[in-house]
Amino acid sequence: MELINKYFPDLSSKQRDKFGEMEALYQFWNARVNVISRQDIETLYERHILHSLGIAKVLEFKSGTSILDVGTGGGFPGIPLAILFPKAQFHLVDSIGKKIRVVQEIVQALELDNVKAEQVRAEKLDDSYEFVVSRAVTRMAPFVGWVKKNISRNSFHPLKNGILYLKGGDLTEELSELKEKARIYELSGFFDEEFFETKKVVYVPL
């Protein structure tokens, strides 16, 4: 929690409580269904929660924003972002049912009424959203192909509607496959920890 307080000092007590509850919830559920690697559960706040919140350093979601989290796995980046932005609406999807069931349990325990978690493939979705978020589900070009149809034309943020994607490493070759122009935000510019040295948020306006 010290990490979250360090980079997000203006949280309400309710938000702090919810972030604080996440560790015990994930330890409980991860022992039953492996949604996070065993060694990563020890670094939950750095490698999952704070990493997810890197998107919030790039863009603050306004009230009424609709966000789709594709391939949410154990609920990242969607759940931490939903705690941080309680007035935005989040739709968390994954094709693996047992992972979504864990996410649904955690969402319920945290009383996140701005989150819907569903077992469905992104390609099957018809709804529209201002932003799509995700964490290294696949290469960027096919990912853009899956979700381009779901991006709303109604843009009301400093950044045009599109994708905010958490990625690591050298992305030169991967981004060269994109027709769209991507912008990279280095998370090392926001967070001091060594883990973030190669981590990025890739923004693709659509």
Image: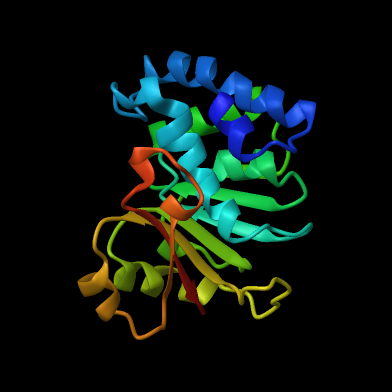
Q: Quadrant of the N terminus?
A: top right
Residue 34, position in %: x, y?
Answer: 33, 25
Residue 8, position in %: x, y?
Answer: 65, 39
Residue 150: quarter of image: bottom right
Please, is residue 184 above or below residue 182 in the view?
above
Please, is residue 6 above or below residue 170 in the view?
above
Residue 58: quarter of image: bottom right
In the picture, measured across the screen, residue 15 lies left or right of residue 27, that is: right
Please, is residue 130 above or below residue 14 in the view?
below
In the picture, measured across the screen, residue 86 lies left or right of residue 40, that is: right
In the picture, measured across the screen, residue 87 lies left or right of residue 58, that is: right
Quick check: can you spot residue 76?
Answer: no
Name the colouring of the figure: rainbow
Q: Residue furthest left?
A: 173
Residue at 69% x, 58% y: name it: 61
Residue 97, position in %: x, y?
Answer: 40, 37
Residue at 70% x, 22% y: name it: 17
Please give the count of numbered marks on the rendered protein.
0
Seen from the viewer's position, the closer of residues 142 and 171 is: 171
Please, is residue 80 above or below residue 22 in the view?
below
Seen from the viewer's position, the closer of residues 11 and 103 is: 11
Seen from the viewer's position, the closer of residues 15 and 184 is: 184
Quick check: can you spot residue 51?
Answer: yes
In the picture, measured across the screen, residue 11 lies left or right of residue 143, that is: right
Residue at 77% x, 59% y: name it: 64
Residue at 44% x, 33% y: name it: 46
Residue 112, position in %: x, y?
Answer: 69, 35
